[in-house]
Amino acid sequence: MPQTEHSDCRAAARLRALRRCMAEAGYDAFVIPTSDPHLCEYQPRDWMFREAFSGFTGSAGLLIVTPFAAALWTDSRYWEQAQMELTPLAGSAEAVTLMRQGQADTPEPADWLVAELPEGASIALDPNMISAAEFDRLQVRLLAADRSLVCDASLLPQVWSDRPAPQRTQAFGFTFGQAPRSEKLGAVRQAMRAKGAGALFLSTLDDIAWLTNLRAHDIAHTPVLTGFLLVTDDKCVLYADCAALGQDAADSLQSDGISLRPYALALTEAPALTRGLAVWLDENATSRAAAQAFEEVNDIAPVRGLRPTQSLKCIKSAAELKLLEDTMAHDGAALVELFAWLEDRRRQGTPVTEGDIVEKLHECRLSRPGFMEESFATICAFGPNAALPHYQPHGAGATLSGDSLLLIDSGGHYEGGTTDITRTLVWGEASRAMKRDFTAVLRGHIALAVSQFPEGCYASQLDTLARHPLWEIGADYGHGTGHGVGFCLSVHEGPVHISPRAPTVAASRVRKGLVLSNEPGLYRAGRWGVRTENLVTPVAAESAADAMSPMLVMKTLTLCPIDTRLVDTSMMTPYEIWWLNDYHRRVREALTPLVSARARAWLVRATDII
Amino acid sequence: MPQTEHSDCRAAARLRALRRCMAEAGYDAFVIPTSDPHLCEYQPRDWMFREAFSGFTGSAGLLIVTPFAAALWTDSRYWEQAQMELTPLAGSAEAVTLMRQGQADTPEPADWLVAELPEGASIALDPNMISAAEFDRLQVRLLAADRSLVCDASLLPQVWSDRPAPQRTQAFGFTFGQAPRSEKLGAVRQAMRAKGAGALFLSTLDDIAWLTNLRAHDIAHTPVLTGFLLVTDDKCVLYADCAALGQDAADSLQSDGISLRPYALALTEAPALTRGLAVWLDENATSRAAAQAFEEVNDIAPVRGLRPTQSLKCIKSAAELKLLEDTMAHDGAALVELFAWLEDRRRQGTPVTEGDIVEKLHECRLSRPGFMEESFATICAFGPNAALPHYQPHGAGATLSGDSLLLIDSGGHYEGGTTDITRTLVWGEASRAMKRDFTAVLRGHIALAVSQFPEGCYASQLDTLARHPLWEIGADYGHGTGHGVGFCLSVHEGPVHISPRAPTVAASRVRKGLVLSNEPGLYRAGRWGVRTENLVTPVAAESAADAMSPMLVMKTLTLCPIDTRLVDTSMMTPYEIWWLNDYHRRVREALTPLVSARARAWLVRATDII
């Protein structure tokens, strides 16, 4: 994903203009989250307000502007980058202060607002850029401190004069592994009846793409179209820009009872259509602006709670899982081609940069059947860079040299599903310490891959399985162990996450058909990073005699060698060694027919038993 | 703990009287939780309203009375008992319907109220019997459904004409292992300043006992006195019934700057004393009545959040931990005497009942130095009874016969701290299935006892360590793996719990000095139950080379043999077997000097290596 470039002086000029408009409107602060009307993980370019007004290009952050100060909160992944990008204006009137989110002495944004502004202060934000739930929390906090929160949807767009036009690409029907729309709509309507909802309003683009069996390329790394969707018992209306949809797709929708209306009418027409109905609005996936639009015309209290599409689409169909098997083999084959190429380059002594690898990997995937695009910007990190879990090379990045580890975390959207895989390779000689770290991570990975657990347990309960072998060597990792993965949709898909902090609610229970990542890691600042990631899906475990309840076990989907040069078998149990050899047997069988002769020789060596 | 007996017709007469008074007051429902003004785990006898009006004697439940219906919610532990106790009035106008809490088709109480009562209905409860936080949640729920929640503190006491008098026992100073009051008060005041609170009001009796270094016997199984406590920067006022306190204790309090005022004045005088101060009220540990009393006279918004005494007292001092070591040896010795006696009875062929064992165990503990009382009613369950995790024998209970398992979960309050221990023994011959279940539980217990983990991780992250070996045999348990234990205070002490559902907040982080239980279990309905419980405390782990952060490991405090006749070593790793043998070596060394000759012979056999 190419980084959008904004020159520093443009950000400064916009900040000055924002302050002038704030003064006219009587606002004491403007809160600018990294968000958009669809609460996407990757923002559309025309909603990158936080970047436009601060110059900070990272993917996460919150900007607050007052007449005399501006502060940017972002997490540890971006501290260095933000510091660099904010530096040019340091000392000027348009300086933005970096707030290191998560550090003990960094105030929460709401606390900062209360400390900086007097009682009675008026704090504005664009209601399109915050979820209804977050808005409520912020409002309660500010009201308790006698500050008021004001919604203003026009000021920011007005100030950003060179705002890019919305990106609208051609949408297309997507039927690979998908149930017919009518069937999905039937399931959604059944969930609505069970919940007592007369209507459902969806803002999240992956839910809409799943339900309508449409895809497009409006958003980076997520093959979705921009729209809103309203479902009632007898209507289904897609608010999207018709021109971009194409007549064929439109006709097909029409015949499935889905009517098309202009995107711009969504927040006026849809609320009007639901008068007298209890409307289901997922408060965490609906903007405050949308929620308010419904409140204003509808007296009936909305139904809250997780949208049904999220619970339905996270369980992959048998057809999707079948396609995913082929996709995994092709994606693994692309990586094997990369690794063989890399070994050649090393043997030839030709210098290689992180950027070269990103480019080559893209090329390897491009030739694979059904490949559409990367499912996220490739993380390719050598040596100390790999100690930053989300590092992405800017341009060429570091050149591989000396003895260290190379971490590559990448994935693709294919017609046959989405992949997400991390491999860590040795470059040069593997030291004892590298092997210890790699093997501990591998043991964590294997523990989650082989352990059986009760069907319906909370995903958070599985996290410790992968983390425990890291603890044994005095290590740990700051991220979760796994996330859900969409089917040719978002690479991070809710509602199930394997993390110590994942909520213990019904939606977080582990069931058959989920597709989750298994990605423990270990990051030694200034030295290296290790992560080994496969996608897995829970299947029924062979039932033990006297089992008290149905048990599940993960089936590993990803097919790609794990670097055995980094494995210290003396740290492993015989069963763990067996697992690795058996996995490599599967990988060799599946990938051999799919790779070039050069890569085949590499594959045979890489999957040799240990 | 002797069960309070209420005859059925008394409960029915009270229910009739309650309905008459409700009609006069215009209430459509009265909600009667199992609670009291101090939100104790064990209710004082004069606050057993739920029992008085329903006849149900279990320790947990919620009664709701409307003009035409009465319904009692209780959890699965009590379904059988409640059904039995509610049966005599079934079919009459005073019938109480059992609501099986946790069953999928059982409505939540608030939903039931909304379904049963018309819009505009007026629902009453006694604000002394609900926490401020729970009250707020219930009120929000009912207001959203156009029902109103009314506080009435006088109706229930008025209707319960033969209500027992409050139990007030002689309070006494308790200094074993305790820092001086002045030091504890200093730490509390420091926490208050850090939180920006000008005053702290405590309702919870164990917090007050800890801070004042006082104990009494007002409440079953918790050696505390009944009172409220107010702390400001220059004052500390204990609201308790002075007559019961004794002149010596009162003088000693006075000299430490703690003044004594009558209990009955707490909710009027304390609020008046804090006018203009921000008062820290833990919303989960303060009744709605108390919170309201402060709101009424104090304009300053209260400070919410976990009370500081909870975070301070959960970390045991070095002196407490030292005393606890001796206490553990004596408590283990008491159990060894019991087990030796039990073996004699078996050899002699004398029948033994569950009740006999409870009585004998009490006798064995009575002779131990510093023993005060049981820390909870002993759970002694044979065969299928042990499949109910909280079973307690009524009277004699079952007679031990045939081949099965005997589960004994018990504990004591000693001057040197509180114990909580569970052992499962074989009676007769151990079958393969019994050994498999016992060994899986033991492996879970050992996993938590030996694993190292990062200092400051969440307690919920440790739960899976103990549960995983159960999963391996297709089993699981419905309760958490561990709870905090007070020092001669409550046997269930917050805020740290090892459970999948424990919150991931700062207060739940694992730190040195906590005392926690380690008690995985396995319950086969109709057959048997297994639980093995020791108390443990986190200590620094031997640091590994290259450790990324300080690591902790549990030190096992409880000293008592684990039944090796039930161990299947073929299921265990050599390290697990080593742990068990090493534990038995420690147990034998510590307990040999403390037991009778007869018990010594038993101890030597029981701690033999396997």
Image (cartoon, coloured by chain):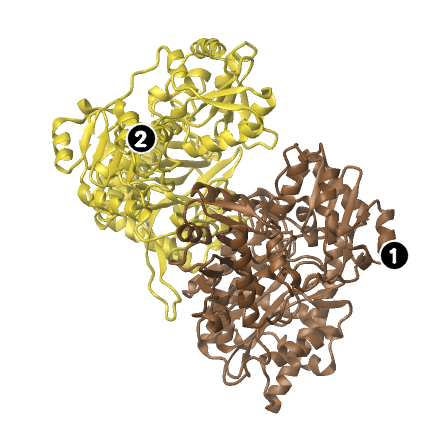
Chain colours: A brown, B yellow
In the image, B105 versus B584, the foreground residue is B105
**What residue is disc 1 on?**
A248
Nearer to me, A492 or A429: A492
> Where residue B397 sits: x, y (%)?
41, 25
The image shows residue B502, relative to residue A373, as above or below, that is: above
- Front: mark 2 or 1: 1
Percent x, y of residue B133: 43, 34
Chain where mark 1 sits: A
Residue B146 lies in quadrant:
top right
Residue A568 in the figure: left or right of residue B345 = right
Q: Residues within 10 Å of mark 2 (few under 14, many from 20)?
A: many
Check chain identity for marks 2 and 1: say if they share one: no
Horizontally, is A465 left or right of A193 in the view?
A: left
Subunit that carries the residue with mark 2: B
Residue B442: percent from the left, percent from the top?
A: 43, 48
Q: Which residue is mark 2?
A: B221
